Image (cartoon, grey):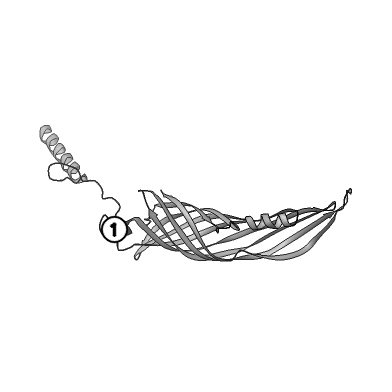
Amino acid sequence: MRLFALVALLASGGAWAQAASTSEPGGGVTEAPAETTKVLGPFRADARFTVDTDILLAYVALGVNADLGLVKLGPGVLAVGAGLDYGFCGTVCLLVGAALGGSFGIRNFFPQARVSYHLELPAKGANNTLTKVDVYGLVFGGVVVSSMNFGTTVQGVKVTASSEGVGPGIGLGAGGSYFFTERVFVGAEATAKYAQGTYKDVVVVTPPNSNVDFRWRDMYSGWSISGVSLRLFIGFRI
């Protein structure tokens, strides 16, 4: 009786092991199929480093962002993410500061949330270029923190001005990634953005050889970084 129970137990264990793995003819184990396209899948993430400027480096914007695939929805995958853009005035501010005999700078920080939709392309065949491409549309929004600073000395009189402002930033766009290795990709995002607000300005004038300065605080001016841009990026799939 005990021998019969032992034989039954071994037989059932062998059947379970055979059901747990798929075998090819000849005894080989079939591995899980590889990715057929590079569309961002559920529970996969893409991290990017972005740059946006012109040939004259008048204004430079650097950024990092990431998207996490959530769920397959229709012909694509819905994803959420976050990003941070840092923009600063380049050659134009250097020229303005030099012309005024001082320093001049503009900086913008834009933390943002992102929602994107990654479209499954009709890619067929191992050598089809579309199997290495991920295209998506996106919307994003957040808060922009902007600042401007100026300082110069004229005939011994020191003049400084500083401005700070906070305003909303929202936008939409489309992007595409090309995977030149299994995980590393390059691409671009074209976006249209609305971002503007009001500076609170502080101007300080200090006469020469004086410990007393004159300040003007109740001054306001507007700022805007709205517009259309094309951001290039390099990224990594996690």
Query: The disc labelled 1 sits on which kind of residue?
Result: Asn
Of residue 207 and residue 8, the one placed in the foreground of this image is: 207
For the question of whether residue 38 can be seen, the reply is: no
Is residue 51 at all visible to an observer of this figure?
Answer: yes
Q: Is residue 107 left or right of residue 12?
A: right
Question: How many dots with numbers?
Answer: 1
Answer left or right for 113 relative to 166: left
Q: Is residue 72 left or right of residue 158?
A: left
Up-down relation of residue 84 to residue 9 (above or below)? below
**In the image, what residue occupies the spot 26% across and 60% down?**
124
At x 70% / y 62%, what residue is drawn? 199
Residue located at (17% from left, 42% from top): 28
Please tell me which residue lies in front, 116 or 201.
201
Q: Among all residues in the image, which is located at the extreme top?
A: 3
Q: Which residue is mark 1?
A: 128
Q: Quadrant of residue 89?
A: bottom right
Compared across the picture, whether 151 is left or right of 235 comes to right
- Location of the N terminus by quadrant is top left
Q: In the rendering, at what x and y percent does residue 136 appear?
A: 41, 62
